[in-house]
């Protein structure tokens, strides 16, 4: 079956890409943007700078800066109201995955109405809302090039996966200079998130030759640079490679889907407020060990692309090295276990069935090379603990 590939219409990558915003909006005839961001971006001076870039192109932007990490239905409502009551012709998601995902949701809800729950998977949201311009500041989620947004329903503690062409940004400006200020903890969490996207896209049942190319290229960039960016945030070369790697990983997984790590990660995030990248990092070694026997040759390719094995290693040796690397990475990047993170053991154990049901309902585990039953997911959560 031919692979269907969705990408932003305009993708500008490299130092200074965000300074092109005014020119690009003018070229598209867009005059009334709403910048959707968080308070950290305001405090760091990024929003003032981007408003100046727009001003010099004769564009006056309004700002909604109340987005929160891991956005919820309630956290985006004021932004939705602002779009419904205003005269905006596009939204600019500026920040990490949380503001970009908030912008995507606001672009659809503000334009078409309804509740976020109406748009969750398995519905495909292919109708277009307001044009979305995405400017990522973490290397990261890849949300700037994905047809996905993730919004938590705080009433049911469910991270709702919403996907479709309507959530694909029209423009992505990928400027690694914006990521220099990311603190080490977030550098680690977002970097492992990107690595997980690349690995899961490569082993996904929906992988295609196109997504394989993006995923392997992403792993070659992310593998050797994650530790460097974590230990020295001012390492421009490492930051640049991480940013490009995260964007390529986003292209790969948006078109090939993520798999079991993400499926099991979302319930941990929703119930216990573990940042998305961190819950992925917790799960990556355990789920990789479970999945390797189904496609050992694919995981061995990952080990070689990340740079921990080479062409002299047979698949078994490469996969042993991959497992060692993933465990070592979690130690060096100080990724806690769920217990060390402070999750209540009784609540976690009592909640396993619900988390397994949510993981399966998200659809992601179906893309895993080995599709687990609910009982196997519960056992994997226990192993993780
Ligand atoms: P985030 O956006 O939640 O940001 C984490 C923290 O880092 C925030 O406090 C933020 O203000 C800060 N930060 C961001 N950029 C910074 C910078 N340049 N300097 C200093 N601080 C900075 O984190 P994230 O990991 O980028 O995004 C996580 C969200 O993305 C989750 O909600 C997750 O579900 C979602 N996600 C979406 C997709 C997708 O395809 N849409 C994919 C993966 C994850």
Image: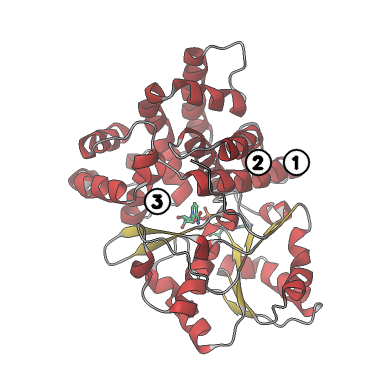
Residue designated by label 3: 274
Q: Residues within 10 Å of mark 1 (few under 14, many from 20)?
A: few
Q: CA distance from mark 3 to mark 2?
A: 22 Å
Query: As displayed, is residue 177 above or below residue 261?
Result: below
Task: Return the x and y of residue 59 as percentages of the image width and height.
Answer: 74, 81
Task: Name the N-terminal-most of marks 3 and 2.
Answer: 2
> In the image, which disc is placed on residue 64?
none
Q: Secondary structure beneath disc 2?
A: helix
Colouring chosen for the image of the structure? secondary structure
Judge by depth and name the residue closer to the eye, 57 or 176: 57
The residue that appears at 38% across and 33% down in the rendered structure is: 287
288 or 229, nearer to the observer: 288
Q: Can residue 187 be seen in the rendering of this structure?
A: no
The Cα–Cα distance between marks 2 and 1, rounded to whole angstroms, is 9 Å
User: Nearest the camera: 322 or 149?
Assistant: 149
State if disc 1 and disc 2 touch (CB < 8 Å).
Answer: no
Instruction: Return the residue nearer the eye: 353 or 372.
Output: 372
Q: Secondary structure at mark 1?
A: helix
Q: Is residue 78 left or right of residue 264?
A: right
In the displayed structure, 63 sits above or below 202; it is below
Q: At which x and y percent is residue 304?
A: 59, 23
Between marks 1 and 3, how big is the CA–CA gap?
29 Å
| Among the 4 quarters of the image, the one containing residue 285 | top left
What residue does disc 2 label? 229
Please give left or right for residue 245 compared with residue 354 in the image.
right
Q: Position of residue 130 (x, y in %)?
A: 56, 74
Q: Which residue is mark 1?
A: 237
């Amino acid at each position: 079956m031919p692979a269907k590939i969705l990408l932003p219409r305009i993708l500008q990558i490299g130092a200074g890409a965000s300074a092109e915003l005014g020119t690009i909006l003018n070229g598209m005839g867009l005059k009334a943007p709403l910048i959707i961001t968080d308070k950290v971006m305001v405090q760091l001076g990024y929003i003032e700078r981007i408003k100046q870039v727009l001003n010099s192109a004769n564009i006056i932007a309004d700002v909604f800066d109340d987005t929160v990490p891991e956005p919820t239905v309630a956290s985006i409502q004021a932004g939705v109201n602002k779009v419904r009551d205003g005269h905006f012709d596009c939204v600019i998601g500026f920040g990490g995955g949380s503001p970009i995902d908030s912008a995507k949701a606001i672009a659809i809800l503000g334009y078409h109405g309804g509740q976020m729950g109406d748009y969750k998977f398995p519905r495909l949201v292919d109708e277009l809302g307001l044009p979305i311009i995405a400017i990522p500041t973490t290397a990261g989620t890849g949300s700037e090039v994905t047809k996905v947004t993730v919004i938590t329903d705080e009433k049911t503690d469910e991270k709702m996966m919403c996907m479709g062409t309507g959530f694909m940004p029209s423009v992505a400006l990928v400027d690694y200079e914006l990521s220099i200020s990311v603190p080490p903890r977030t550098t680690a969490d977002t970097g492992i998130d990107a690595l997980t996207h690349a690995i899961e896209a490569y082993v996904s049942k929906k992988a295609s030759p196109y997504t394989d190319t993006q995923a392997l290229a992403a792993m070659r960039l992310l593998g050797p640079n994650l530790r460097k960016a974590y230990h020295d945030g001012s390492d421009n070369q490492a930051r640049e490679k991480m940013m490009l790697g995260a964007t390529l990983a986003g292209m790969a997984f948006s078109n090939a889907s993520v798999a079991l790590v993400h499926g099991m990660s979302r319930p941990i995030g929703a119930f216990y407020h573990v940042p998305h990248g961190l819950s992925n990092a917790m799960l990556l070694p355990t789920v990789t060990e479970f999945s390797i026997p189904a496609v050992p040759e694919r995981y061995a390719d990952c080990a070689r692309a990340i740079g921990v094995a080479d062409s002299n290693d047979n698949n078994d040796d490469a996969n042993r090295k991959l497992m060692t690397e993933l465990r070592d990475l979690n130690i060096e990047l100080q990724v806690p276990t769920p217990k060390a993170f402070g999750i209540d053991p009784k609540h976690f154990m009592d909640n396993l069935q619900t988390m397994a049901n949510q993981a399966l309902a998200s659809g992601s585990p179906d893309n895993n090379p080995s599709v687990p039953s609910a009982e196997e997911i519960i056992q994997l959560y226990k192993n993780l603990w």
